[in-house]
Each structure stands twice: as C-alpha cells, then as structure tokens.
Image (cartoon, rainbow, N blue to C red):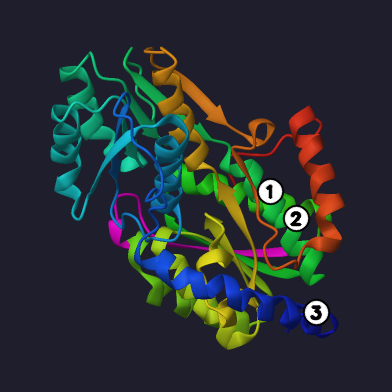
Amino acid sequence: MRNTKRFAAMAIVATFGLVATACGDDEKKSTDTTSSCVETGELKLGVAFDTGGRGDGTFNDSAGRGADQAVCDLGATKQELEATVEDDRQPNLEALTAAGNNPVIAVGFAFGDAISVVSAANPDTIYGWVDGYLDLPNVKTLSFAEEQGSFLVGAAAALACGCDHIGFIGGQEIDLIKKFEAGYTAGAKQINPDITVEVQYLGAAGDNAAWGSPDKAKEIALGWYADGVEVIYTAAGGSGAGTIDAAVEADKWAIGVDSDQYLTATPEQQAHILTSMLKRVDVAVFQTAKAIQDGDLTGGFKVFDLSVDGVGYSTSGGYLDEFVTQLDDLKAQIVAGDIVVPTAP
C-alpha cells in the first residue's frame, strides 16, 4: 500500500487537479494548441506521426506539442499525417514531401525503411528522424538519453515508496526500450541497493501489438501489485494506460512515460501517477524546425540528454516535492559525469 500519511496530502492535491482535468477532457480530443497562433507560411513543417497519432498521451503527443510551438513561435505552417497501419509510413512521408514541407519529421524508430527510401530520393528536403539513425546529409537524427530520465524516475520510485519491490513493463523487447529498463533499475538501486525490480516485455522485436495492449499490461501489473510490488514504470506506448488502471484498482503507484501523463489523466488516476519520465520529443521537433528556419540545412546526429533537458521527470501532483533536492542532485551528478547511467540491463 502507498504511504498512508502522505495519501491525505495527495488527496488535497488531486482535488485541485479537478480543475486541470476539466480542461483535460478537451485536450484528449485534440491536443493541437495552435488555434490562436499565426502561420506566416515562411516555414512549412511536416510531421509524420506513428500509429496512435495525436491523443496517444505519450510519444506522438509530445511531438505534436513541438510542432504546435513551431507554429506559435516561428510562424510555421504545419501538416500532419498519422500512420494508421504500418504500410502508411512511406506514403505519408512522400505526401508530406510532395506538399513542399521542409523539414519533414518522422516520429519513431519504425520509420527506418521508409525514411531511408524517401530521404535518398529527395536530397533537397531535410528530414528529422526521432529515435533512428541514418547517415545521410539531409537527415537529422534526433536521439534521446532515455536511460538518464529513467534513472531519475527509478530513484523517485525508491524514494517515494520506501520499499524493496518495484516493476518495469516494456513494449517491444528491443535495445531502445532496454535503455528505459536499465536506467530505471540503476536509479532505484542508487537509492536502495537491495531493491528488486520485476521486468516483463509485452512483445518481441517487431511485434507492434506491444504498443497497444493495455489489457495485457494491466494483467501483468495487477499480478505484480498483488505480490507486493509498490511502483510500476511502463515504457510501452498506449499499453501504459493499463498499468495506470491497475494502480488505481490496487491503490499503488504507476509511473508514466514520454509526456506528463498526470496532465491528461482523470482525478482518480492522478492520485496514482507518481511521476512521468519526460522524453522531450517536443524540444527535438521544435529545435529541428528552428534550425531549418535559421539556415541549418545539414544532417547529423543529436542526443537530447539531461544537460539540455531533453529528458527529465515530472513533478505534477506534488508527490515528489520532498525528494526534488535529492533528484536534482542526482541529475547534476549525471550531467557532470560523476554518475554514468547504463544503457543496457
């Protein structure tokens, strides 16, 4: 069970969350915030979302916020297309390119085959690829130090629960998601070397159902909570909603990923979202658009880490207020190189 002394304070915080969540219902329907911004047309930004698109509450939504910022701060026009099935990725990139967008951002590692073909065929268009790597002069690879942000939420989990048993649920069992697992485990053990971290993945590499299986995540989470796990961190796209539902039922903690999931949760869910690991895809998308506007038409590889606030942790709900000083000290040690976070379990 969660710390009952702190739960009374949490309930007060969650009550104030009612106001934010009243607006959050509209946010779930459409996360586009550009209705009052002026598009000048001087910069045309194309965004190719992966499956889930806007409204997924995590990865795509974060990219969408970066595109919205480009409209409001840079006067960009934007065109967005969502991959509803895997075969949409290349046609969507081709359509955004043909419409004259520059840059065109591909959101997600699964765009690998598609962006390889389209970028090679269109050398005058600059592409940004989130979570990939392609060594072409017109491709900006946008990578993140997910292990660093995950280290901080792992430390937060151990600090907040004061327990010896936490869990991690991953989507596809691939190197990218193993970075989340490795950082989370290392952060928790930094606080409590004796802590046990349960780990389970929802699918093998290439199993795209892993990103959209909340029922499966919920089943795993409920089993772990019943066995004494106090906090579960899920890095599995839309599947993470199942963990949050399980945390509500079990009166335990869940940790969100990519976006601050507290902000789009119900009041009941908010009382169980300890924090979220922030993967600032919004920062990467906006900075890529600004680079093009400023005349940077080259490719290259950029890592968004703690030193540039490319990753981090959320404090919504106030559940980590008493631990912020310790967490920020750990952040400073990572940035200084005094703590080296592993990228693999």
What amino acid is at disc 3? Ala
Q: How far apart are marks 1 and 3 (CA)?
A: 26 Å
Q: Which of marks 2 and 3 is nearer the N terminus?
A: 3
Identify which residue is drawn at 36% across, 28% down: 128
Q: Which residue is tagged 1?
A: 151
Q: In this view, does 157 lie to the left or right of 250?
A: right
Q: Which residue is tagged 3?
A: 9
Q: Is residue 170 left or right of residue 311?
A: left
Identify which residue is drawn at 38% across, 16% down: 299
Q: Which of 302 and 97 is in front in this view?
A: 97
Q: Which residue is tagged 2?
A: 155
Q: Give the range drawn in magenta.
A: 196-209
Q: Nearer the viewer, residue 181 or 257?
A: 257
Q: In this view, does 273 lie above or below 267?
A: above
Residue 103 visible in image: yes
**Is 191 a magenta residue?**
no
Q: Position of residue 135 (x, y in %)?
A: 35, 17
Q: How far apart are marks 2 and 3 (CA)?
A: 21 Å
